[in-house]
């Protein structure tokens, strides 16, 4: 296993992964790209037993979505989870109908409500561009796919940690990864504190 402290935003990371998937005819490896922003300057502290809450889980069959918990979350938490819905499939039947997005009460993927909520709390240009493009969703059954197997969150004061397990596949290959991302809730935005990604 190779551990990397990721210094790039989630948008660039997912773009690189999906570009690799969607260009399966090319054999060149995807190069990591460092983007200088005011985010992700330090890696988060990884604490495995911090009462992280299962939000979403999918490993084949029907997905698990913690709707009881989602009914109690703050707007900031909702925006954070809605942000993750832009990156990988969360049981998406097509590019508009994703179960986690719907469970958050945002209707269709990249609906006006979805986009407005994410852009309210994530004010960087990359997130605005991501929302403008509609995200990086590859629907179920796509030739090249990327999806979340698991999303968890843990809260400590105004800090919130997101843990995820992801997977991807093409007709000729597949892979998995996991990550820990740490954020801070500020009065008018969600600030990235650090990210740690591991390829499995």
Image: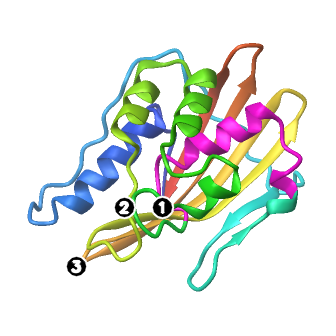
CA separation in Å, label 2 and label 3 = 17 Å
Question: For residue 173, what is the image quadrant?
Answer: bottom left
User: Residue 147: x and y, percent?
Assistant: 47, 64
Q: Is residue 189 above or below residue 27?
A: above
> Pointer 3: residues within 10 angstroms few (<14), some, or many (20+)?
few
CA separation in Å, label 3 and label 1 = 20 Å
Residue found farthest to the bottom: 61
Residue 200 can be seen, yes or no: no
User: Residue 32: x and y, percent?
Assistant: 31, 40
Circle 3 is placed at which residue position? Answer: 172
Circle 1 is placed at which residue position? Answer: 89
Q: Is residue 123 above or below residue 25?
A: above
Q: Is residue 37 left or right of residue 72?
A: left
> Pointer 2: residues within 10 angstroms few (<14), some, or many (20+)?
many
Q: Is residue 181 left or right of residue 15?
A: right
Nearest to the observer: residue 116 or residue 11: 116
Nearest to the observer: residue 138 or residue 38: 138
Q: Earlier in the sequence, mark 3 or mark 1?
A: 1
Q: Is residue 166 above or below residue 31?
A: below
Residue at x 52% of width, y 35% of height: 112
Q: Earlier in the sequence, mark 1 or mark 2?
A: 1
CA separation in Å, label 1 and label 2 = 6 Å
Secondary structure, mark 2, is loop
User: Residue 118: x and y, percent?
Assistant: 58, 31
Residue 87 sits inside the magenta stretch: yes
> Pointer 1: residues within 10 angstroms few (<14), some, or many (20+)?
many
Residue 21 sits inside the magenta stretch: no
Residue at x 54% of width, y 18% of height: 123
Which stretch is magenta? 69-90
Label 1 with label 2: CB-CB less than 8 Å: yes
């Amino acid at each position: 296993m190779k551990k990397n402290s990721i210094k790039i935003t989630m948008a660039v990371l997912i773009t690189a992964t999906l570009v690799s998937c969607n260009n399966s005819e090319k054999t060149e490896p995807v190069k990591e790209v460092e983007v200088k922003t005011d985010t992700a300057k330090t890696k988060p502290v990884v604490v495995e037993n911090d009462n992280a809450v299962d939000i979403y889980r999918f490993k084949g069959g029907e997905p698990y979505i913690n709707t009881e918990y989602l009914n109690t979350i703050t707007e900031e938490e909702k925006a954070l989870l809605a942000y993750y819905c832009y990156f990988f499939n969360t049981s998406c039947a097509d590019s508009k109908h994703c179960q986690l997005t719907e469970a958050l009460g945002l209707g269709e993927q990249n609906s006006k409500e979805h986009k407005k909520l994410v852009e309210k709390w994530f004010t960087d240009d990359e997130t605005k561009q991501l929302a403008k493009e509609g995200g990086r969703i590859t629907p179920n059954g796509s030739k090249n796919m990327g999806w979340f197997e698991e999303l968890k969150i843990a809260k400590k004061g105004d800090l919130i940690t997101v843990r995820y397990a992801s997977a991807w596949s093409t007709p000729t290959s597949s892979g998995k990864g996991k990550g820990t991302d740490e954020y801070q809730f500020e009065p008018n935005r969600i600030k990235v504190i650090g990210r740690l990604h591991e390829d499995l």
